[in-house]
Image (cartoon, helix red, strand yellow):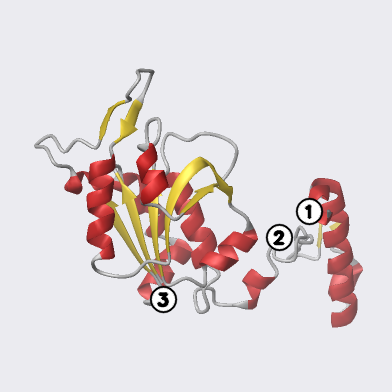
Amino acid sequence: MHIDIITTLPKLIESPFSDSILKRAQAKGIVTVNVIDLRQYATNKHRTTDDYAFGGGAGMVMMIEPIDNCIADLKAKREYDDIIYMSPDGQRLTQSIANELSLKKNLILLCGHYKGVDERVRQHLVTREISIGDYVLSGGELAAAVVADAVVRLIPGVLSDETSALSDSFQDDLIAPPVYTRPAEYKGWKVPDVLLSGHATKIEEWRHEQSLERTKQRRPELLD
């Protein structure tokens, strides 16, 4: 998979890709993440990428021309499955969307900033808008990192145990069950006996029951 991330703050987003799973995925050659400084595509000497909003009002707006120039340059090099704008009013990111995007080959993630992008970017240049929650961040960089992490970890070969991602919360619309590790008893707090039984069928039944109960308690809307 190839992911291009367009941003005016490249240093802000580089850190999440230089450690842990995302770093290993790139080292294995499974994923390429390219962080692109939008200011390279500005058309004046000050490398301006934002301007005042027509009609007035507080806040600046990201200009269409640098974004169009950048996307056009990228599209000249490869064909993209999706050009995604990170926006608080976009489609809410879910595990099913992450699963879908993990099957793609080439993605662009466009990070908004200030009061957002010129509406014509949304109308004519992007193919999809994604939000990571009903709140506003200073920019789309952290949201883009979240999307990339959620997607990349699902690609075969990224995790050392590929079945691990299949048992994550939300994969089957349920919250994951409780997990325990050694010691089996600590300060009188014991691991459930079934997990120590070695009986695979009973363990799976217990985990499913726990997932159902935890989902009912914490996220009952998932069961709808």
**Mark 2 or 1, closer to the camera:** 1
In the picture of the structure, the residue carrying the numbered disc 3 is 30
In the picture of the structure, the residue carrying the numbered disc 2 is 170
Pointer 2 and pointer 1: residues touching (CB < 8 Å)? yes
Query: What secondary structure is marked by label 2?
Result: loop
> Considering depth in this image, is 223 or 184 the residue closer to the camera?
223
Pointer 2 and pointer 3: residues touching (CB < 8 Å)? no
Q: Residue at x 43, y 71 (%)?
A: 25
Q: Which residue is drawn at 78% across and 53% down?
A: 222
How far apart marks 2 and 3 lie (CA) works out to 24 Å
In the picture of the structure, the residue carrying the numbered disc 1 is 222
How far apart marks 2 and 1 lie (CA) works out to 9 Å
Residue 111 in percent (x, y) is at 38, 46
Q: Is residue 177 left or right of residue 86?
A: right
- N-terminal-most mark, 2 or 3: 3
Q: Is residue 199 left or right of residue 157?
A: right
Residue 192 in percent (x, y) is at 88, 64
Q: Residue at x 52, y 63 (%)?
A: 151
Amino acid tagged 1: Leu
Amino acid tagged 2: Phe
**Mark 1 or 3, closer to the camera:** 1
> Considering depth in this image, is 204 or 186 the residue closer to the camera?
204
